Amino acid sequence: MRIAIIGTGYVGLVTGACFAQAGHRVTCVDVDQPKINLLNKGKMPIYEPGLSELITKGRQQKALDFSSDARAVAASTEAVFLAVGTPSSGQDGSADLTNLYEAIREIAPALQDGCLVVIKSTVPVGTGEEVQRLIESLRPELDFDVASNPEFLRAGCAIQDFKMPDRVVIGADSERALDALSGLYCAMGIEPTRVVATQRRAAELIKYAANGFLATKIAFINEIADLCEKVDARVGDVALGIGLDCRIGRQFLNAGPGFGGSCFPKDARALAKAGAEHGTPMRIIEAVLASNETRKRSIAAKIRAASGGDLQGKTIALLGLTFKAGTDDMREAPSIDLVQALVEHGAIVHAYDPVGIERAKPLLPECVRYHRTALDAASGAAAAVIVTEWDEFRHLDLARLKRRMAAPLLIDLKNMLSAEQVTGRGFKYCAIGNGTSPTRDHAFKVWSKPRATAYRTGDGTGRRPSISLNSKVVAAE
Ligand code: UDX
C-alpha cells in the first residue's frame, strides 16, 4: 500500500518506519523543511532506540522517504495517517488542533477516490466527524473514509510497542475503512483478536481514558509512597502486594518524582477539559493533575531535608534530566520543576543526562552546569540525586562516587538502587516511599509453586512465615 504519514514526531516516524519495514511504500511528511532535510540525509531529529537503524533500512530499500510537500504526496497515496502534534492550548488544557486542520486543508485537494484518512494524533472526541465534514466541504465529490487509530506507543520502547501492541484500536464508521485498517495491522502479524473495532468517538475517547487511567495509577502510588514514609512502610512492598492482584496489575505502580512527558499531562488536561465542557467534571483526573503538579514541586523539599535543611550554596548533582529513560524528550519532565525549586533554595545545580542535555539546556536556568558523566556531575556535590531511571545509574561505581562527592548522600527518586548496597558503601541513602527507619532490603522472591496453604505458622526459626499470594508463594528473607 502507498502510505503517507503527516507529522514526523515520535509517533509519525515510528509508524512510517514500521509500515515501510512491513513492505509498504511510505512517505513521511513534515512542514519543518530542515527536519526533512536532516531525515533525507539519514540523520535523526529525535532519540528513540532502534529507530535510526529502521529508518536507514527503509531508505536503503527505497520503501521510505521524506518530503515537505503534503499535497503532492497525498495525490499518490491510498492511506494518509495524520500524526501531527496536538499540544495543550493555553491555560484551559484543551487540545490545539491547528496542525491537524492545516494538514487536512493541504491534502484535501489532492486526495484520490477511495482514499483512507486515518487520525493517529490524540484528538478530542468528535474530531473525526469534523475532519470528515471539512473534507466533504472541500471535495464534495470525493469518495473517502476517515478513521480514528490512536497510538499507544511509549517513548523509549516505541518500536516494540508499535509492532507488538496490547491492542490496536480502530474507530471507523464504514466496513471498508475497518477492513483496510485491520488488514494493514494483521498483515504485520498482529493477532486479529487484538484489533478493537469501534466507532470513531469511542476510539478517540479510549486514548484519553487510557492515558488518564495510567496517570491515575502513578499519582495513586506516589501518594501511597508519601504515606509509606510517614508510617515507615516500603512502597515497593506495597506496590508488589497490590500489583500481584490481576485486577490491579504490577505495571505503572513505580513511585517517583511525578509523571511527565508529552502525553500524560497534556491528555489528562484535555480529558479534564472535555469533562468540564460536557458538564461531567472529571474530578479524579483533576485531582491527579493537581497531585502531580504539587509532587513535582515538593521533591526539592525532600532533597533539602535530606541535605540538612538548607541548600544555600550547596552543589546538588542531578543524574538524569529527561522525563523518563530511553528518550531525549524533556517535555514536562519532573527535572524542570525540580531544578527551578533547587535554584530558588540557593542550590548550585550540576547535571548529567546520557542523551537529553541539548534538549534540556533551553528549558533550564542558565546557571545549571552540565557534565559528560555522572561522576563528573557529582564532583564536590553535597548530594547526588537520581531523577531518571537510566540503566547506567544501576551500575554507579559507588566507591568512586563517594570519593568525588563533598558528602556521601545519594537520593534515589526512582528507587533504582538497593538500600543495603548503598548504605553498605558508606552513603546516606534516601529513596521514595521508604519510611524513616534504616531500610533493610526485603529480597522478595516470587516464584511459581503449587498453591501453598495460606499462612503456615512460623517454623520456630524466627523467619517470617511464607505467605501465599494468589498462586504464588512469596517469602521475605
Ligand atoms: C505514555 C503512555 O504510556 C503511552 O501509551 C502513550 O502512547 C504515550 O504516553 P510515555 O509518555 O512515552 O507513554 O511514557 P510512560 O512510560 O507511559 O511514562 C510516562 C511518565 O510516567 C514518565 O514520566 C514516567 O517516568 C512516569 N511513570 C511511568 C512513573 O512515574 N511510574 C510508573 O510506574 C510508570
Image: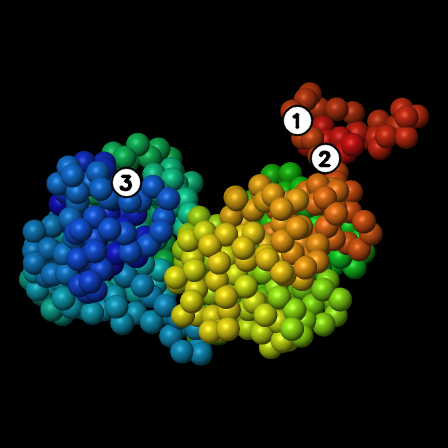
- Residue depicted at 34% across the width and 38% down the height: 163
Judge depth for marks 3 and 2 and give the one in front. Answer: 3
- Residue depicted at 7% across the width and 55% down the height: 75
How packed is label 3: few (under 14 Cα within 10 Å), some, or many (20 or more)?
A: few
Judge depth for marks 1 and 3 and give the one in front. Answer: 3
How packed is label 2: few (under 14 Cα within 10 Å), some, or many (20 or more)?
A: few
CA gap, disc 2 and disc 1: 12 Å
Residue 308 position within the rendered picture, expressed as x and y whole percent measured from the top left: 75, 66
Does 100 sit above or below residue 24?
below
Quarter of the figure with the C terminus: top right
Question: Can I make out residue 339 in this image?
Answer: yes
Does 154 sit left or right of 297 as displayed?
left
Label 1 CB-ligand 1 distance < 8 A: no
How packed is label 1: few (under 14 Cα within 10 Å), some, or many (20 or more)?
A: few
Looking at marks 3 and 2 on the same chain, the residue that comes earlier in the sequence is marked by 3
Q: Name the residue under label 2.
A: 443
Camera-nearest residue between 271 and 327: 327
Question: Can I make out residue 216 in this image?
Answer: no
Q: Mark 1 points at which residue?
A: 447
Question: What is the three-letter code of the residue carrying label 2?
Answer: Ala
Quarter of the figure with residue 179: top left
